[in-house]
Image (cartoon, rainbow, N blue to C red):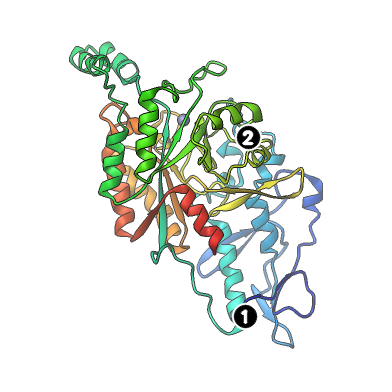
């Protein structure tokens, strides 16, 4: 295989693989959603195409010189999804300023757990293999078929006695309340439990990523951290985790996705080695956040998942670069898509799955990640490793991680996973 593959976007009459560009003027009109979608089958999978008009042609044809002509504009469809076009030009926002799942193409076409862009690239890959007469070898993760990033947003470290204790007291469970309060006042709140999270990671032989929230003041009535990241107790935790090889990242507070100064102040409260960010409540602003993350020199962000559902918000199961619409170019910042947040599973506004329903529900998504040699990014809050978090929190974390181990994953920190992709 030659080092430079000849793939041209447009019919140049000479490249080994040529992609027929769309005639659509969609990208000049700045509308959020394509007008029409056509569906075409690919090895038993129906794939939507956003910028093609008919599907009678085969996926690709061969010209007289043996060059392969791809008949559909998969590049335009992939760009539409990866760039977050629908989020930038769409006006829908939830009360926290987030782009809602229900307004997405993924919801409209029920394809959130299908990484469509990976399917498009698979078509392209087959075209290249055909043009060059040999298959392209898949890229693996330290020799394993896929990677898993275990990540932990640290919102609460010292209020289990209050948050979990209050309902206990209301239900008349005085014993539980006293137990939690006692833990608190002897200096060990049930959620000051990072060593327990570490213990679970160690069992898996995995290094994790811990996003710390340096803002304590509530924002427009929404709570930020219940701890002071500068306190000796927290600094000790951060040093210990970092020394053990875990990654420390920033958990940008409410509103920081819109405000460079706020985000910078927060970043400066953490070790200088911090490379990544995830916004608290996943409050990534589709218009402002990409440029802001680039301005502050972040190597990556990992906020792009829908809080309402698990799956692929940008229809892709590998890291990709965030797009700056104003500059009309990719930023230097990578996005490590977030596939599953613990809260999504049981929150009253979200899925409300029982513990027994969780793993079977996740399997089809995980299968896709394995198939495309992608990355599974999981967010499990520290409080859900304790008995005072979500129902069966620790058990579910173990079930999910055991399952990915059975599927032969390798574990990476978020920054390592992004590095790995850049190396290739
Ligand atoms: Zn958070």
Residue at screen point 27% across, 24% down: 190
Residue 193 place in picture, x, y as percent? 30, 30
In the picture, the disc for residue 52 is none
Q: Name the N-terminal-most of marks 2 and 1.
A: 1
The residue that label 1 is drawn on is 2
Q: Say left or right for 118 vs 295.
A: left
Residue 188: x and y in percent read 26, 22
Q: Is residue 421 left or right of residue 174?
A: right
Q: Which residue is drawn at 34% across and 54% down?
A: 404
Quadrant, the C terminus: bottom right
Residue 381 visible, this angle: no
Say if disc 2 is inside 8 Å of ligand 1: no
Mark 1 lies on a secondary structure that is loop
Question: Is 386 situated left or right of 325 in this image?
Answer: left
Q: In which quarter of the image is the N terminus?
A: bottom right
Residue at 34% across, 37% down: 240
The answer to which of 206 and 264 lies nearer the viewer is 264
Report which residue position mark 2 lands on: 285
Q: State whether residue 375 appears in this view.
A: yes
Residue 303, how many percent across, how many down? Answer: 53, 40
Local packing at callout 2 (Cα closer than 10 Å; few below 14, some 14-19, many 20+) is many
Residue positioned most to the left: 175
- Element on which disc 2 rests: loop
Foreground: disc 2 or disc 1: 1
Q: CA gap, disc 2 to disc 1?
A: 41 Å
Say if 362 sits above or below 7 in the image. above
Q: How crowded is mark 1: few (under 14 residues within 10 Å), some or many (20 or more)?
A: few
């Amino acid at each position: 295989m030659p080092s430079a593959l000849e793939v041209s976007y447009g019919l140049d009459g000479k490249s080994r693989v040529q992609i027929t560009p769309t005639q659509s003027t969609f990208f000049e009109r700045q509308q959020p959603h394509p007008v029409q979608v056509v569906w075409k089958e690919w090895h038993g999978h129906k794939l939507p195409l956003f910028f093609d008009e008919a599907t009678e042609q085969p996926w690709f044809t061969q010209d007289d010189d043996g060059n392969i002509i791809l008949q559909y504009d998969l590049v335009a469809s992939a760009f539409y999804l990866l760039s977050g076009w629908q989020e930038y030009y769409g006006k829908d926002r939830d009360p926290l300023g987030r782009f809602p799942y229900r307004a997405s193409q993924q919801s409209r076409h029920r394809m959130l757990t299908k990484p469509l862009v990976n399917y498009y690239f698979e078509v392209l890959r087959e075209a290249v293999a055909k043009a060059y007469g040999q298959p392209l070898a898949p890229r693996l993760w330290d020799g394993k078929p896929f990677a898993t990033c275990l990540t932990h947003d640290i919102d609460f470290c010292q209020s289990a006695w209050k948050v979990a204790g209050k309902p206990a007291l209301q239900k008349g469970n005085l014993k539980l309340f006293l137990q939690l309060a006692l833990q608190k006042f002897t200096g060990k709140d049930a959620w000051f439990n990072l060593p327990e999270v570490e213990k679970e990671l160690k069992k898996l032989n995995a290094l994790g990523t811990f996003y710390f929230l340096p803002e304590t003041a509530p924002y427009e009535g929404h709570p930020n951290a219940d701890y002071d990241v500068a306190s000796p107790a927290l600094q000790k935790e951060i040093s210990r985790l970092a020394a053990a090889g875990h990654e420390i990242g920033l958990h940008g507070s409410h509103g920081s996705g819109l405000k460079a100064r706020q985000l910078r102040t927060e970043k400066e409260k953490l070790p200088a080695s911090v490379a990544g960010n995830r916004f608290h409540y996943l409050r990534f602003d589709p218009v402002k956040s990409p440029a802001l993350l680039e301005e502050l020199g972040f190597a990556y962000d990992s906020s792009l998942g829908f809080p309402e559902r698990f799956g692929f918000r940008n229809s892709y199961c590998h890291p990709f670069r965030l797009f700056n619409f104003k500059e009309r170019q990719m930023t230097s910042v990578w996005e490590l898509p977030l596939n599953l947040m613990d809260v999504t599973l049981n929150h009253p506004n979200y899925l409300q799955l029982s513990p027994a329903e969780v793993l079977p529900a996740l399997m089809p998504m995980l299968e896709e990640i394995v198939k495309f040699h992608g990355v599974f990014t999981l967010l499990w809050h520290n409080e859900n490793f304790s008995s005072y978090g979500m129902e069966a929190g620790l058990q579910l974390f173990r079930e999910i991680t055991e399952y990915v181990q059975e599927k032969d994953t390798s574990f990476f920190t978020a920054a390592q996973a992004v590095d790995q992709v850049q190396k290739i």
